[in-house]
Image: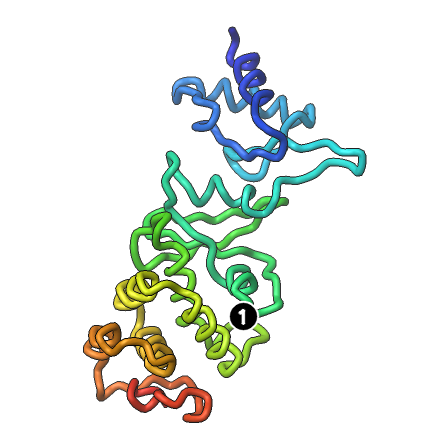
Amino acid sequence: MTITSNIYKKINQLPNGKTFGYADLHIAKNDYSAAAKALSRLVEKNFIKKISKGIFYKPEQTSFGELMPDYQELLRPYLFKNGKRIAYETGTSLYNRLGLTSQIPFRIKIASIHKRINIDGKILKTQAVKSYTKVTNSNYQILGLLDAFKDIKHIPDCSITQGLHRLSAIINELTHQQQKDLIKYALLYPPRVRALLGAILENENKEVTLLIKLKESLNPLTTIQLGVTKTELPTKNNWYIK
């Protein structure tokens, strides 16, 4: 069987709307050149569509026209490598899903500690940012939430007060273990994240033992300028927030 017919057969077995790359087709590295030509011909025939270099999808045809993959499926090839998560979505698009803003960005931010994921395609545009730690399937949601704490002053259409209320509500929905993980990873973030998280946790009457490491990580001679009032965050003075 030729490389072209083998690739065609494998793609034909994929569900419509599925994104894929060379690894998903199990193409040997020494066959990449021939495979690239075969995939290029399939793109020209509209059998598949190209998202970015080396990433494609099989379009779904309906009576209303051609459907693109859903949003999460478009991102999936860039967030995982060999089945393991290596990156996560952050920035305004994530904050929109967290209920912090109504805005939808033109370019999506993708965070990873090692790989810089920049895409400038017709379908998907991304900007690479560096994560504060190795990304896994068990911590990426916590890291995204901590990013919101970090960016609270710069989230579009979201005042500090609105951000505080929403972040407090999200924290109250977390399990005890998730709150412990939030503190664990917050220690890797800038002081303003640790201070704001500590103030919110204390304001929500979370157990004192959870807060010790956060408090000890802060320099009492350094103030965090957030521009919040004591009415908005009653515990702010305990965490050196102005």
Residue at image coords 41%, 57%: 141
Residue 218 on image: x %, y %? 23, 79
Residue 112 on image: x %, y %? 37, 51
Residue at image coords 32%, 60%: 132
User: Residue 143 sits in which quadrant?
Assistant: bottom left
Residue at image coords 68%, 32%: 60
Instruction: Please give left or right for residue 237 compared with residue 233 in the image.
Output: left
Q: Residue furthest right?
A: 63
Q: Residue furthest bottom?
A: 230
Residue at image coords 26%, 68%: 187
Camera-side residue of 92 and 128: 92
Residue type marked 1: Leu
Quadrant of the rendering where the C terminus is positioned: bottom left
Q: Which residue is mark 1?
A: 100
**Vertical placement of residue 223 versus 62, above or below:** below
Label 1: few (<14), some (14–19) or many (≥20) C-alpha neighbours in 10 Å: many
**Vertical placement of residue 92 versus 126, above or below:** below
Where disc 1 sits, the SS reads: loop
